[in-house]
Amino acid sequence: MAARNEDLEPETGRDLCRVRRGEKRRGYRKDILTNNLSERDAVFICIRCQGILRKVCISTDGGEQFCSSCKEEGESTHPNLPMDKMVLSFKCSCPLMVRGCRWLGTIEGCEDHLDTCGYVLETCKLRCGVVLQRDELKVHEKEKCPQRIVECKH
């Protein structure tokens, strides 16, 4: 089913982090994990955005851990690379699983997967305004788009 709306922002699946228009990326979404976090896993939760830590940094003042995008201006921090590596190895599903994508992997692999996932919504490159899943868009642009170039039969 095609949507036609100039204001519709295609869902790229890049919402591994909950992002609203104009916001910075924050922590990873908890609902993409294939295993639920337990209470002892609270160390992996950002104290500021409550998402799973993304690009972990540590405050040099109090030792608090949070996402690098949650860092306040002028705040002194340093990266926590071992924690980053652990988070990137968490098992997850594609954020577009609700549309039918069955990909399973790690948070680190999910970024690459989304570059090719057929369930990502994209806008027609021929500028007709239609928004479709990536796999359906190829057929649309080639065979159905009213803006496509067709060869004259006469």
Image: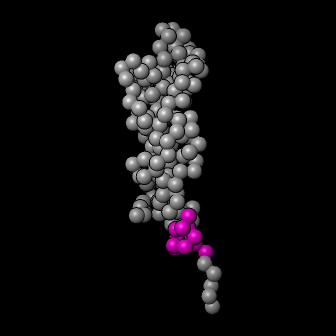
Q: Is residue 26 something that shows in the picture?
A: no
* Front-lying residue, 9 or 65: 65
| Relative image position of residue 41 (x, y in whole percent) | 42, 21
Picture residue at 39% right of the left edge, 18% below the top: 40
Rendered view: 124 above or below 12: below
From this viewpoint, which residue is outermost toward the bottom? 154
Query: Dividing the image into 4 quarters, which one contains the C terminus?
Result: bottom right
| Relative image position of residue 123 (x, y in whole percent) | 51, 58
* Front-lying residue, 26 or 93: 93
Q: Which residues are magenta?
A: 138-149
Residue 40 falls left or right of residue 60 = left
Query: Dividing the image into 4 quarters, which one contains the N terminus?
Result: bottom left
Numbered marks: total: 0
Q: Is residue 25 magenta?
A: no
Q: Quadrant of residue 95?
A: top left
* Front-lying residue, 128 or 18: 18
Picture residue at 41% right of the left edge, 61% below the top: 3
* Front-lying residue, 64 or 90: 90
Identify the colour scheme used: one colour
Picture residue at 60% right of the left edge, 78% below the top: 150
| Relative image position of residue 104 (x, y in whole percent) | 49, 42
Q: Is residue 139 magenta?
A: yes
From this viewpoint, which residue is outermost toward the left? 39
Picture residue at 63% right of the left edge, 81% below the top: 151
Q: Is residue 43 something that shows in the picture?
A: yes
Rendered view: 19 above or below 52: below
